[in-house]
Each structure stands twice: as structure tokens, then as C-alpha cells.
Amino acid sequence: MANDLDHRRIERELLDNLPPDDPRAVGSRRDLAWINALMFQSAIMASLLKASVRKSPTRFLEIGSGDGAFMLSVAKRLARRWTDVDLVMLDQFNLISDRRFADFYALGWRVETIIDDVFEWIESPRAGAFDVVSANLFLHHFPDAALKRLFLAIRPLAPVFLATEPSRNAIALRACSLLHVIGANEVTLHDAAASVRAGFAGHELSSLWPPDFRRQCAERRIGPFTHAFLAVDRASEGLP
């Protein structure tokens, strides 16, 4: 098993092939909210944001935002510190409900959704500029060549980029078989293991960041399940 995890292995996840309103897809997104909680993903992301972003951002972009549940959990942890935020949520599907919008507005965060291909939108002039860009359980869907292309577009877009991804290790892979305990459906059970095999270890993401700017990068495993990646232009953030 360990040898199988020496290198990334990307396979198509079942959720990507299902219509958004398919009951199996709806159930799998519900499972994902539980998985994020079990991995402490929102707590990890909020902590990284607090440590990496010196002041409350005006414009915040999340790529691969899904139904918005993860970012809402992060926003609740940051709301006292970060106010008057314009959040742009980019995804290929329109999954964010009116209730979710209302929950963000109640925190003082204004939300705009963009339904588009992430590569086409980020590389276009209409993307504009942001204070911070983040991604959660998103980068592992793409091969290295695509991530190089994505990072090349993200680097000038914002001084801070943060990602929380699956950690590719044997403990995480074994844990996937236990997800039936929380009632995870067959889509989730398949996709969780696929995500670990496509996840990251060591400094794999840093090696894909534009070469002239790799000194801005840091990445590490946090706990048994999470691989965190940060690329921070410290001068722009007023950091030493």
C-alpha cells in the first residue's frame, strides 16, 4: 500500500460525473460536510488565514467553492476579525442556496457567485485582483501540468494563496474505509479514497509554483489527513 502512495494517482471521482441534483450527489455533498468537520478543515483554513493575512481582506476569492458550506464555516470563525468582506465563489456548478447567501450576509460578508471553468475565468481579464485566494479539497482533482497552469494565473491575482488538500499517506487511506460509520454513501466511499491517492506529500505543490516565486511557498502535513499549502508575498502583506 505504501508503494502505491509514493506518487499521485488521479482518477475520475464519481461525484464529478453526477448531475448536481442526483440524490447520490446530494448525499455525497452532505457527507463531505461531515468529512470536512472530521478533518478540522475549516479550523485549519481559518488558522492559516489569520496567520497569513495581516489585515481584513476586501476581496476574497474561493475556487472550487461547491455548495458554500465549507467557506461559511470558515467565515463564521473569522467574522469578528474580518468585516466588510466581498467574497467571490467560483465553481462550475450553481450549488449555493438562498439560505447560504443569507447566512453569509448575516456575518456582514457580501457574496458573488461565478459559474465558470476555473482555468478560463482566472486567466481572463475579468478576474480582476484579490487580497486572498483559497481552495479546499480542490487542487487534487488536477494533474501537475494543469496545476502549473493554474498557479501561473493565481500568483499575480493576489498576494496570498492558501490551499487545504488531502494528505497522501497510508493512515488517511485506511481511514477512508471507516467512513461508512458516519453513513457515507458509495460515492463518498469511492471518492474519499481516490482523493487520498491524488493528494499531496512533501513539497509537491511548491515545486509547481512559478519558479521565480517559490521562496514565497510553504507546505506541510497537518494532522493525519490535511496537506496545507501557502504562497504569500510577504512584502505585499507587510510581513518581514
Image (tube, grey):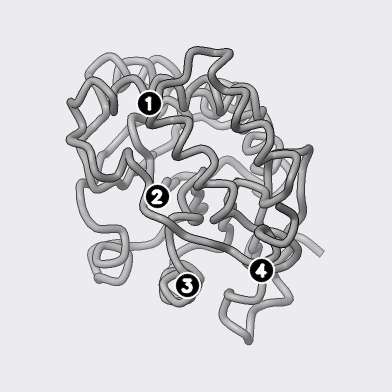
The local secondary structure at tag 3 comes to loop
Could you tell me how far apart the alpha carbons at marks 3 and 2 are, in whole angstroms?
15 Å
Q: Residue at x 45, y 37 (%)?
A: 190
Q: CA distance from mark 1 to mark 4?
A: 28 Å
Mark toward the start of the polypeptide (3 vs 4):
3
Q: Earlier in the sequence, mark 1 or mark 4?
A: 1
Which amino acid type is shown beneath numbered disc 3?
Answer: Pro
Kindly check if marks 2 and 4 are in contact, taking CB atoms under 8 A apart as contact.
Answer: no
Which residue does the numbered mark 2 point to in the structure image? Answer: 63
**What residue is drawn where x is 43% and y is 62%?**
142
**Helix, strand or loop status at disc 1:** helix
| x, y percent for residue 113 | 25, 40
**What residue is disc 4 on?**
204
The correct choice, above or below, for 87 with respect to 2 in the image is: above
- Which amino acid, by three-letter code, is at mark 4? Glu
Labels 2 and 4: the sequence-earlier one: 2
Q: Are marks 3 and 1 in contact (CB under 8 Å)?
A: no
Which is nearer the N-term, disc 1 or disc 2?
A: 1
Left or right of 188 in this view: 44: right
Q: Nearer the viewer, residue 135 or 36?
A: 36
